Image (tube, coloured by chain):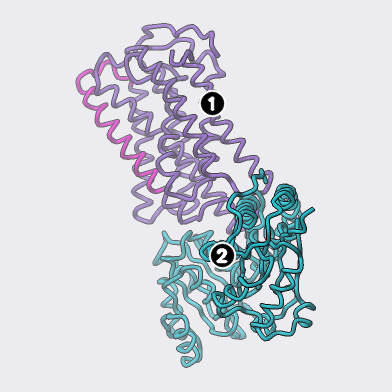
Chain colours: A purple, B cyan
């Protein structure tokens, strides 16, 4: 408990703040006014802090990074995407990116909080005190958060591309960043995500070589497949062979693949060691 | 009951054509301020002097002081008072406050919603402060005007969208490239439209400009005025790939840029978008170039439609802005009027205005 609030209560606060950011952006669009980038940014920041506290409480209980079930993986993914947005949102004229980030954060946190089964059982001490495994897992899920933000940026790119090709620049489209800025953000996010996932796999490989029987091959295959898509897409983009809309669609497919691989990651965990804490405080 | 009043007197682009505004423009504000300081009953004064308006915002012991300000100004400009009265605006009280709110918000500008006026009003206020000619009422009035202007710009679409073809073209380019500081612009054809568009790009930060024309002499002249390079018109196909934005406005009877030439150009720069702006009639660029990946082609009709949509959107916002500003002006004026009624100070010169501001929530 922090400030008399349980972990889930903090996470509900975060969901509420992300939703508030999303509603603020929507209200600006409906009113036809300028999107309040600073206000949305501060709302997301507040949600991020609340989520950080909530995950921190769970991490303390779990004795490591809170990645013990699907609930925690979704929460951590949302937190990772928000972390990256808070870093790049300042640099770019991206109130729309903030709007979409708050939407993603709200969707992932509310979805995970609304499905009790995802948090019914919770593994603790899943890393067995091995910091390398913990680093591997947290980096991998963090990279998925980066891919989440990449998917949002790619969606914005596709909207901007559509608006420019169809010559519709007014209304909602006027809030979008320039297509070149979006392309630059995409490339950087993909590069960062691919680098993080590469590091995660390298650290995972150290463990894999020492304890091969305990590594789920399905999980390994799924994670390597996601890494391959990211690495190949990045290489093709840098060499100028995957561009514009096709690049954006590939980034969206990458995030979809990452989300699908989460099931494989979760099912290949070690046996459950501890039931989840009572969920009386939603 | 005090007769103290807030007033604005002046002339703007609404009633004064450019040749009249040239005569009304104040060339020496310092000298005029000096003369105005002798106007009896004038407590506070600020001068807004731009290419589209000359306006005096004042607080005086009575309305007659406004006429004295007019007389001093007309005498200095050697402008007939009778003629000035035909074109002037003269507002008092709440209407004067509302007028400043609308001016600062860009609602009274020639190009409604433009931002430049906000800075000009700020400069006018700063100058008046520097000369000690503002006091409680004008300080509050201008501060509230700035707040109101920021409010309507943030909460309405009054500033969004451009309404001239050249500016629409530049806005379009920012939708693709963001900042234009690093964008390379090539203008093919140096007629009035081409030159105007090149100037618009230059004024919005594009530094790498080049022009090409069948007439090398004319191209050189236009390039000189814009600090731009010249490019051989005949070798235009070879140059396209080095530019991000190509503006065509020639009077050629046929297209001067083929889809094949554009395709070859984009192949040499696949990762960077190419914006083609065709302002010519008949068109200069083959229409099928729009189908190429990373190529965005806009012709005169496309830009005109965007300009029209912007204009319509702004007009819809004007009524909303006026409503917002009117509420704020009423609230401010209610407090200022109470202050003026209560103050009842003896008449003072503009440099010794009362220091304590009336407090309002406007």
Q: Is residue B224 above or below residue A134?
A: below
Q: Is residue B257 magenta?
A: no
- Residue B117 image position (x, y, % from top left): 60, 65
Q: Nearer the viewer, residue A175 or B276?
A: A175
Front label number (2 vs 1): 2
SS type, badge 2: helix
- Residue B110 image position (x, y, % from top left): 68, 70
Quadrant in the rendering for residue B281? bottom right
- Return the residue at label 1: A15
Q: Residue at 65% across / 83% down in the picture?
A: B77
> In this image, B56 relative to B290: left or right?
right
Boundaries of the magenta span: A187-216
- Residue B267 image position (x, y, % from top left): 42, 65
Mark 1, Cα crowd under 10 Å, few <14 / some 14-19 / many 20+, is: many
- Residue A63 image position (x, y, % from top left): 32, 14
- Same chain for labels 2 and 1? Say yes or no: no
Q: Residue at 66% across / 78% down in the picture?
A: B73
Q: Nearer the viewer, residue A162 or B202?
A: B202
Residue B55 visible in the snapshot: yes
- Return the residue at label 2: B128
Q: How far apart in space, not on screen, are marks 2 and 1 (Cα)?
A: 50 Å
């Amino acid at each position: 408990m922090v400030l008399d609030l349980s972990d889930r209560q903090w996470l509900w606060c975060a969901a509420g703040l992300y939703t508030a950011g999303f509603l603020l952006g929507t209200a600006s669009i409906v009113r036809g006014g300028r999107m309040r980038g600073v206000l949305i940014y501060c709302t997301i920041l507040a949600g991020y802090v609340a989520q950080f506290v909530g995950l921190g409480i769970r991490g303390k209980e779990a004795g490591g990074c809170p990645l013990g079930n699907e609930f925690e993986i979704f929460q951590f993914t949302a937190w990772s995407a928000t972390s990256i947005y808070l870093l790049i949102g300042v640099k770019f004229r991206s109130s729309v990116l903030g709007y979409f980030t708050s939407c993603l954060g709200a969707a992932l946190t509310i979805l995970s909080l609304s499905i009790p089964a995802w948090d019914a059982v919770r593994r603790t001490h899943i890393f067995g005190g091995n910091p390398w495994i913990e680093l591997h897992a947290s980096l991998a899920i963090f990279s998925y958060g980066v891919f989440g933000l990449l998917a949002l940026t790619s969606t914005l790119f596709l909207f901007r591309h559509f608006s420019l090709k169809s010559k519709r620049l007014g209304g909602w489209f006027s809030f979008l960043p320039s297509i070149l800025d979006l392309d630059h953000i995409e490339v950087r996010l993909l590069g960062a995500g691919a680098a993080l996932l590469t590091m995660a796999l390298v650290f995972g490989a150290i463990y894999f070589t020492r304890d091969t029987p305990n590594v789920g091959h399905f999980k390994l295959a799924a994670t390597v497949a996601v890494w391959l898509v990211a690495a190949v897409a990045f290489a093709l983009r840098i060499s100028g062979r995957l561009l514009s809309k096709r690049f954006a669609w590939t980034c969206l497919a990458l995030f979809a693949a990452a989300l699908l691989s989460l099931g494989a990651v979760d099912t290949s965990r070690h046996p459950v060691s501890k039931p989840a804490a009572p969920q009386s405080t939603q | 009951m005090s007769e103290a009043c807030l007033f604005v007197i002046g002339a703007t682009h609404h009633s004064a054509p450019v040749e009249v505004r040239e005569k009304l423009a104040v060339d020496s504000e310092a000298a005029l301020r000096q003369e105005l300081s002798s106007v009896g009953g004038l407590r506070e004064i600020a001068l807004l002097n731009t290419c589209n308006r000359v306006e005096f915002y004042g607080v005086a012991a009575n309305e007659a002081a406004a006429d004295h300000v007019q007389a001093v100004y007309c005498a200095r400009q050697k402008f007939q008072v009778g003629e000035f009265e035909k074109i002037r605006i003269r507002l008092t009280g709440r209407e004067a406050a509302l007028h400043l709110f609308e001016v600062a918000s860009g609602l009274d500008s020639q190009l409604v919603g433009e931002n430049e006026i906000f800075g000009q009003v700020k400069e006018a206020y700063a100058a008046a402060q520097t000369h000690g000619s503002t006091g409680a009422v004008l300080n509050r009035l201008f501060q509230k005007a700035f707040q109101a202007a920021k409010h309507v710009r943030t909460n309405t679409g009054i500033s969004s969208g451009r309404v001239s073809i050249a500016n629409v073209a530049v806005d379009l380019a920012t939708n693709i490239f963001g900042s234009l500081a690093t964008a390379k612009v090539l203008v093919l054809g140096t007629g009035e439209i081409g030159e105007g568009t090149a100037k618009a790009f230059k004024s919005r930060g594009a530094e790498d400009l080049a022009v090409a024309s069948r007439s090398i002499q004319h191209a050189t002249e236009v390039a000189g005025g814009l600090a731009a390079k010249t490019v051989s018109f005949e070798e235009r196909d070879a140059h396209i790939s080095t530019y991000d934005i190509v503006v065509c406005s020639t009077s050629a009877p046929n297209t001067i840029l083929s889809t094949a030439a554009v395709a070859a150009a984009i192949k040499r720069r696949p990762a960077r978008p190419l914006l083609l702006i065709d302002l010519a009639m008949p068109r200069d660029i083959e229409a099928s170039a729009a189908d190429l990946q990373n190529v965005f082609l806009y012709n005169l009709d496309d830009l005109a439609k965007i300009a029209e949509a912007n204009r319509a959107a702004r007009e819809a916002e004007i009524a909303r802005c006026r409503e917002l500003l009117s509420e704020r002006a009423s609230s401010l004026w209610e407090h200022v009027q109470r202050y003026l009624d209560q103050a009842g100070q003896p008449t003072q010169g503009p440099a010794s205005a009362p220091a304590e501001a009336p407090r309002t929530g406007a």
